[in-house]
Image (cartoon, helix red, strand yellow):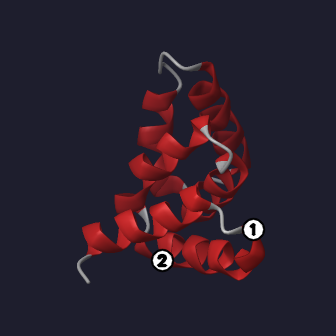
Amino acid sequence: MGQGAAVDFWVGVLRQGFPHLAYLKYEGGAKLKDIGHPAVRKLIALFEGNDRTVAIDVISAIGEPAVPDLLTALSDEHLQTQMGAMEALARIKT
């Protein structure tokens, strides 16, 4: 599976939730963290949904490579995206 397909797959897993299979969110988060920066924009898109906390956790773990995309998200038209970006930025240790 190529990197782009992997990002799409794991972001889809996070988006679906699977409450009875919580380990899938953990696994998806770990895989997306390993992929790193290429996953950031798709994770930012999750700030508007129920998966905001998981997306913030993963982006925070990716760290400094996510900062430019998070700074861009601060000017997004959606308040949830702005708030998610602020929270993720606050958690990243530079």
Q: Picture coordinates of residue 24 (x, y %)? A: 63, 78
**Residue drawn at the location 38% of the way across and 66% of the way down:** 7
For the residue marked with disc 2, what is the amino acid?
Asp
Q: Nearer the viewer, residue 40 or 24?
A: 24
**Residue drawn at the location 23% of the way across and 78% of the way down:** 2
**Residue drawn at the location 57% of the way across and 30% of the way down:** 81
Mark earlier in primary sequence (1, 2)? 1
In the picture, measured across the screen, residue 4 lies left or right of residue 28, that is left
Q: Residues within 10 Å of mark 1 (few under 14, many from 20)?
A: few
Q: Picture coordinates of residue 52 (x, y %)? A: 66, 46
Q: Picture coordinates of residue 17 (x, y %)? A: 65, 62
User: The residue tagged with tag 1: helix, strand or loop?
Assistant: helix
Q: In which quadrant is the N terminus drawn?
A: bottom left
Q: Nearer the viewer, residue 90 or 15?
A: 15
In the picture, measured across the screen, residue 29 lies left or right of residue 93, that is left
- Distance of label 1 from label 2 (alpha carbons): 23 Å
Q: Dot 2 corresponds to which residue? A: 34
Q: Nearer the viewer, residue 24 or 79?
A: 24
In the picture, measured across the screen, residue 72 lies left or right of residue 25, that is left
Q: What number is the disc on residue 19? A: 1
Look at the picture and state if 84 lies above or below 5: above
**Residue drawn at the location 50% of the way across and 78% of the way down:** 31
Look at the picture and state if 20 lies above or below 58: below
For the residue marked with disc 1, what is the amino acid?
Pro
User: The residue tagged with tag 2: helix, strand or loop?
Assistant: helix
Q: Residues within 10 Å of mark 2 (few under 14, many from 20)?
A: some
Quick one: which residue is furthest to the left in this view?
A: 2
Q: Nearer the viewer, residue 78 or 33?
A: 78
Q: Picture coordinates of residue 51 (x, y %)? A: 65, 51
- Tags 1 and 2 touching, CB below 8 Å: no
Pair 1/2: label in front:
1
